[in-house]
Amino acid sequence: MMMKKYILILLILGITLSNSFAQEEAQPVYAFNSGILIDAQTSYIPDAKTLEFVIQHKFGSIENGRSDLWGIYAAGSNVRLALNYVPVKNLQLGAGITKKFMYSDFNAKYKILQQKTSGMPVSLTVFGNLAIDGRNESAFGTGKVVQSKGETAQYAVQFSDRLSYFSQAIVTRKFCEAFTLQAGASYTHYNMVGWDYNHDVVGLHFAGKIKFSPQGSIIFNYDKPLKIDGISELDNWDTHAKENLSFGVEFFTFTHAFQIYMGTAQGILPQDMMMNNQKDWTNKGLAFGFTITRIWMF
């Protein structure tokens, strides 16, 4: 009789432990603590019914050194303020305003796959936005901006001419507690561009972080606009956007993430960086910047 009791206890313990291990093996892996890493989107989407406030700021170039406090007092700063909301699990909707070109943007991000401790080695996320160039119409009437490679008459710009689009697929993997890496591919389109620019740009993106403390990480981001003859409308690549390189540090709490970094692109919206960045990180093109995110749960 005692033997049967011991066998029954062992069976119950075995089933309990196996269920516990199975649950542990299937746990989701969260790679980032913020939806934005420097100025790149990440796979992170907060819980449903969460509101996120985003502040992104870039100073001027450090090329003048201490005369303008390494760009902090320099002209050419840029700032973006945004709100993101998660109405349902894995779907985030957002809107923002940006100083450069007075952009207004509307965006959405959706997580298709979630990395887990077993069975799913990566996360897959898609992101897209639409931006509206909000400058006065006189900014488009100088003859320097054209549509479909034809001259634009003064003050003849239509609302659709102001639109630009960016779409991206992001694959993320947290290799260990200290190291996370993500890679992505993107497509950028502007309805109207300058004569010496393409309407379309395809790009590659890499970003990641290396944790050095429970709340601190070294972070980096690299964006590469590709030169593809098949979609180019140009005779040369003189105005082709330069690659963007950024690196810095991040500190986070349960509701905040603060990132300070140095990077090349003056633009904050991804399509602006992929189309217009002419700063060269090898030639004093770097500038300081910071990103702050704050979330509220309802």
Image: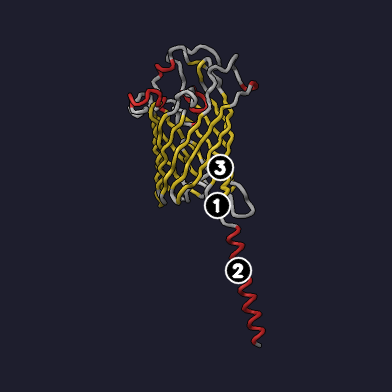
The disc, 2 or 3, on the residue closer to the chain's N-terminal end is 2
**Within-10-Å neighbours for mark 2: few <14, some 14–19, many 20+:** few
Q: CA distance from mark 3 to mark 1?
A: 13 Å
Q: Is residue 194 above or below residue 169?
A: above
The disc, 1 or 2, on the residue closer to the chain's N-terminal end is 2
Q: Residue at x 55, y 28 (%)?
A: 188
**Which of 217 and 196 lies nearest the eye of the viewer?**
217
Residue 181 numbered tag: 3
Q: Residue at x 63, y 72 (%)?
A: 14
Q: Which residue is tagged 2?
A: 17
Judged by depth in the image, the label closer to the viewer, 2 or 3, is: 3
Q: Position of residue 84 (x, y in %)?
A: 44, 42
Q: CA distance from mark 2 to mark 3?
A: 33 Å
Give the quarter of the figure containing the N terminus: bottom right
Kind of residue sitting beneath label 1 = Val
Which element carries disc 3, helix, strand or loop?
A: strand
Kind of residue sitting beneath label 2 = Leu
Q: Residue at x 57, y 24 (%)?
A: 200
Q: Which colour assignment does the render follow?
A: secondary structure
Residue 29 numbered tag: 1
